[in-house]
Image (cartoon, rainbow, N blue to C red):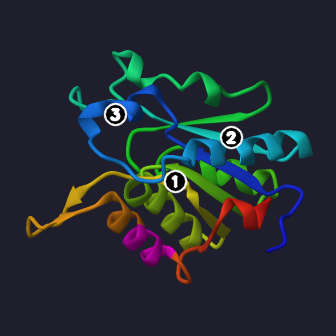
Amino acid sequence: MELKTNAALIIIDQQKGILHPKLGRRNNLQAEQRILDLLGHWRRTGRPVIHVQHLSRSPESVFWPEQSGVEFQERFQPQTGEQLVQKQVPDAFCATGLEKSLRAAGIDQLVIVGVATNNSVESTARTAGNLGFETWVVEDACFTFDKADYFGKAHTAEEVHAMSLGNLHGEYATVVSAAQIL
């Protein structure tokens, strides 16, 4: 893969609430370290970083704005000059102006990391691909949680993660590892 000098790193929902035990068992315990590795590389090379913050409309959510879970984790605090996108639905493009700001900056290559693989990451990557952006999803810099399917069958976080990446790869995005990018 050829990483452009203006490729944007989109870090999705790295907020305190995502660590809440009520979300259940997760996969990719090294995901945050991979995100930090990529973030460090982006900052060192002066590439654009976009932090996406979920502001839920539901008081039951770990991202409800009225509590501390909505805040970014300390290690993922945006720095001066880095863009903040606040969303109320999983898709970071929906009603946020993200597409407009990317187009205005001449950015057409996106590297997406964060949580949850099958929710905000997949939703954002699908839209990015549909809008014609060259979209990369970093499989070891994302994670998700155990989840039952529509019919009530339980699936591990690893299975949910793998299916979500399978949904994306080759159609909406290219799935890569952090090592392939770095």
The disc placed on residue 56 is 3
The stretch in magenta equals: 162-168
Alpha carbons under labels 2 and 1: distance apart:
12 Å
Farthest residue in the front direction?
A: 29
Specify the amino acid type for callout 3: Ser
User: Which residue sits at x=53%, y=82%?
Assistant: 171
Mark 3 crowd level (few <14, some 14–19, many ≥20, 10 Å Cα): some
Q: Name the N-terminal-most of marks 2 and 1.
A: 2
Specify the amino acid type for callout 2: Leu
Q: Which residue is mark 2?
A: 36
Q: Quadrant of the C terminus?
A: bottom right
User: Which residue sits at x=76%, y=63%?
Assistant: 181
Q: Is residue 114 above or below residue 63?
A: below
Callout 2 secondary element: helix
Q: Give coordinates of residue 149: x percent, y percent.
A: 18, 66
Q: Is residue 152 visible from the viewing direction of this image?
A: yes
Quarter residue 43 falls in: top right
The disc placed on residue 53 is none
| 102 sits to left or right of 91 | right
Specify the amino acid type for callout 1: Cys
Q: Which residue is mark 1?
A: 142
User: Which residue sits at x=68%, y=40%?
Assistant: 36
Callout 3 secondary element: loop
